[in-house]
Structure formats: C-alpha cells, structure tokens
Image (cartoon, rainbow, N blue to C red):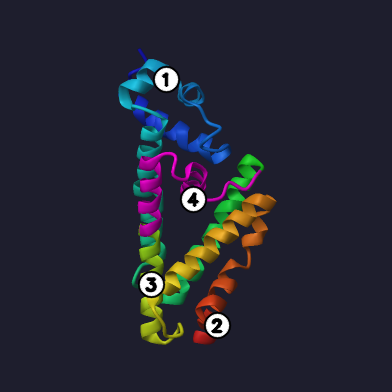
Amino acid sequence: MGRTSDAHERLMTAALDLVWEESYGAVTIDNICQRAGVKKGSFYYFYKSKSDLAVAALERMWAEEWKPNLDRLFSASVEPVARIQGFLEQLHLKQVERFRKYGKVCGCPAASVGSEVSTQEQAVCAKVREIMARKMRYLESAIRDGIADGSIEKGDPAEKARNLGFLIEGAVSQSRIMNDPDLLRNLPASALDLLRARSLSSAN
C-alpha cells in the first residue's frame, strides 16, 4: 500500500529536496511520490494537498534544522556582532554547498516558496511568514544586545532587524538570479555597514 510508518517522513524529505532543486510550482505530487517511493494514494492518506505537505515540511525544517542552528549561532554567550557575522558567513557557505550539490544557487526555501505562491496559497504563505518572523526575532535580539553593549549604533532594534532582513533576502535573491553564491561573500561586511556596527577586530 505504500503506507509504511515512515511514508509521511519520506514525503516531507522528498518535497524539501525537490523544492530546493527546482521550485514549489514546478514540483508535482507525482514528482514527490516518485522521489519518496510512496504511492499517490498514500500521499492523500497523510496530506490533503501539496500545500498541506509544504506547510508540514517547512515546519519540520524549522524544528530539525533551522531552529537548532539559530539557537547555536545566536547563543547569548556569543558577542552580538559575532552572532550576526557568524549567521551570515554560514549562510554564504550553505549556498556554496548547495551550489556544488545541485549546480545552482537554491536560495532560501521559505522565501522562495513565499514569493512564488504569493497570495495564491494562504496556508503556505502564513507558514512562511511565521518562520520568517521567528528568524527576525533572532536578529532583533542580537541587535538589541549590540546596542546595549555599544557595538551597534543606537536605534530601534525592530526597525534595524527589518532593514537587515531586507538586505539579506535581497542579496540571497540576487545570488539566486545570477546563480553566483559568491555574491554573498561580502554580506557580513554589508550588514555591519548597515547597522553601523563595530567589526570584531575593532571591538577587541
């Protein structure tokens, strides 16, 4: 029947891999089932639609990959500026890694899916907004701590975090359009310029 105990896990993994490799719109339920080795009837046993699966897959990616990574990078034991720099340096390295694996810049799956479906699929868009808001809180916390210790110029932490988020997403989008992960190499320096922050070398 294809309804093995791990079928829904395999479907989520297949969906995430295919969205990374292609795009949300280009991926069909048939593609997902074929990659997962699951019969189409079993897909509908676990999920009502592709968007239902996308929401579950994005939440799993958040819980299993993004949140643990962000918790580590943005630990309170790390200096505020180092948190932001470390996050952006890793972002660049991740895109290089994906580029080597797939032969193209994959970008951020949440942002890519969100911009692609726009207002067409409310549940998917709501999940993307939720995940991006969670990410923003990490940036805002680091910025607030940086303002407090003097390593980041004074200002509204929420506004600074939003502006930094715009810079990051814009840079990642350009990297994907140009298919060049090295466009992200200077993102940490650009972020510090935007925040008017002291680099780690000048802060020590």
Q: Residue at x 44, y 74 (%)?
A: 160
The residue mark sitting in front, 2 or 3, is 3
Q: Which residue is mark 1?
A: 38
Residue 134 image offset from top left, x and y in percent: 35, 58
Q: Residue furthest top?
A: 1
Q: Which residue is mark 3?
A: 158
Report, in whole angstroms, how far the alpha carbon at label 4 lies from the one at label 1: 28 Å
The residue mark sitting in front, 1 or 2, is 1
Q: Earlier in the sequence, mark 2 or mark 3?
A: 3
Asked if the residues shown at circle 3 and circle 4 are in contact, with their CB atoms under 8 angstroms apart, the answer is no
Q: Residue at x 51, y 83 (%)?
A: 198
Q: Earlier in the sequence, mark 2 or mark 4?
A: 4
Question: What crowding class fits label 1: few (fewer than 14 Cα within 10 Å), some (14-19), or many (20 or more)?
Answer: many
Q: Which residue is mark 4?
A: 111
Q: Residue at x 39, y 59 (%)?
A: 135
Q: Which residue is mark 2?
A: 201
Q: Residue at x 45, y 82 (%)?
A: 152
* Kind of residue at disc 4: Ala
Report, in whole angstroms, how far the alpha carbon at label 3 lies from the one at label 4: 20 Å
* Kind of residue at disc 1: Val
Report, in whole angstroms, how far the alpha carbon at label 2 lies from the one at label 4: 32 Å
Q: Quadrant of residue 140?
A: bottom left
Question: What crowding class fits label 4: few (fewer than 14 Cα within 10 Å), some (14-19), or many (20 or more)?
Answer: some
Is residue 175 visible in the rendered image? The answer is yes
Asked if the residues shown at circle 1 and circle 2 are in contact, with their CB atoms under 8 angstroms apart, the answer is no
The residue mark sitting in front, 1 or 3, is 3
Q: Which residues are magenta?
A: 104-133
Look at the image and say whether residue 160 sits in the magenta stretch: no
Asked if the residues shown at circle 2 and circle 3 are in contact, with their CB atoms under 8 angstroms apart, the answer is no
Residue 180 image offset from top left, x and y in percent: 68, 53
